[in-house]
Image: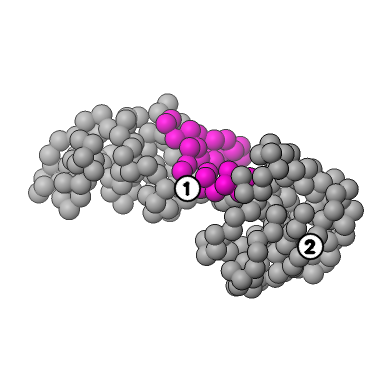
Amino acid sequence: MNIIIIEDEKPALEKLRLQLINYPRPVNIVATLSGVQESVMWLSDNVHPDLIFCDIALSDGISFDIFRQVNVKCPVIFITAYDDYLLEAFELNSIDYLLKPVSQERLFVALNKYFQLKEHFSGNYSGLADYYFAGQQQKTRYLVKKGVSYSTVKLEDIAYFISEHKITFLIDKSGNKYILDKTLQELETELPKNDFFRINRKYIGNISAITKFKPFSKGKILVELTPAVGEEIIVSAENAAAFKLWVSGDC
C-alpha cells in the first residue's frame, strides 16, 4: 500500500512514520509533504497513492485547500490536535479523523477500516475512490451538529437552510435545527437544482417546504415556509421570475 503523509510538525511526522512501519501489512511511504502548496504541486505531478494521512492545520494554511485545488481520487485520514474541523473533514473524502496524540492502536484501527472498505469494493482501488467522490458530487445526506453531538440528516428530510450571524443552520421537516459547517454559497453548488432554491441571501428552501407564496410590493414575492419562520421571507424582484419557473418545474 502506497501512502503519503502531509504533516508540518517533524516530531509528529516521525512518530507516524514509525507507527506505520509497525503495521502488520506492508506500507510504503512514497512522500512526506509539509504544506498546502507543496502538496498541491506534488499531487498535480505524481501518481496518487492508495491513502493519504493529512494534518489539518499546516504552516501555510488549512489542508482542506489542497482538496479544493486538486482532484485527489484516494481516501484520506485526517489528523489534528482539535476536533473543530470534524464536520468539514467528513464532507471531503475522509474515511477517518484522528486526534493527536495518535496511539498506535487507534492508527491501526483506521488502517484496518481502509482495508475493510477496499475489500468491500472487491479490492478495486478506483471503486473505493469513486465511492467517496460520488458522495461529494451528489449529496444524499449532511453531517450536522447539535450541542456536542453529531448526526446526519438525509436530503429528503431537509426543509430549508438559513444563515444567521455567519452560521449556517439546517432545519429538517420536523423543525429540528442543526449547525452545518457550510456556507449557503457552497450549498448552492451541490444541492439538486430541481428541489432547492436560493430564496434570498439568508434562505435556501426545499420545494416541499414551500407552503404558499404571493405577490409582494414592487414585483417581489412573499414566501411561506414550513416549519414556520418568525419573519417575512422575500424573493427579490430580480429573482421573482426564476423562482416562479422553479416552483412550476420549468427551471
List x then y, in percent, for residue 8. 72, 69
Q: State left or right for residue 122 relative to residue 199.
A: right
Residue 94 visible in the picture:
no
Q: Secondary structure at mark 1?
A: helix
Q: Earlier in the sequence, mark 2 or mark 1?
A: 2
Farthest residue to the left: give it: 218
Give the extent of the magenta segment: 128-157
Q: Considering depth in this image, is 220 or 89 the residue closer to the camera?
A: 89
Q: Considering depth in this image, is 239 or 27 the residue closer to the camera?
A: 27
Q: Which mark is residue 29?
A: 2
List x then y, in percent, for residue 237. 15, 50
Q: State left or right for residue 186 relative to residue 20.
A: left
> Which quarter shows the C terminus?
top left
Decide: few, some or many residues near mark 2? Use Cα within 10 Å; few <14, some 14-19, many ≥20. Answer: some
Magenta region includes residue 168: no
Vertical position of residue 114 compared to residue 177: above or below: below
Q: State left or right for residue 203 relative to residue 158.
A: left
Q: Quadrant of residue 127?
A: top right
List x then y, in percent, for residue 128. 63, 45
Decide: few, some or many residues near mark 1? Use Cα within 10 Å; few <14, some 14-19, many ≥20. Answer: few
Q: Quadrant of residue 61?
A: bottom right
Q: Secondary structure at mark 2?
A: strand
Residue 15 visible in the picture:
yes
Vertical position of residue 136 compared to residue 69: above or below: above
Rounded to the nearest whole Å, what is the CA distance between mark 2 and mark 1?
29 Å
Q: How many marks?
A: 2
Please tell me which residue is depicted at 80% across the width and 49% down the height of the picture: 107
Check disc 1 and report the residue beneath it: 137
Farthest residue to the top: give it: 174
> Which quarter shows the N terminus?
bottom right
Q: What amino acid is found at the position of numbered circle 2 in the picture?
A: Ile
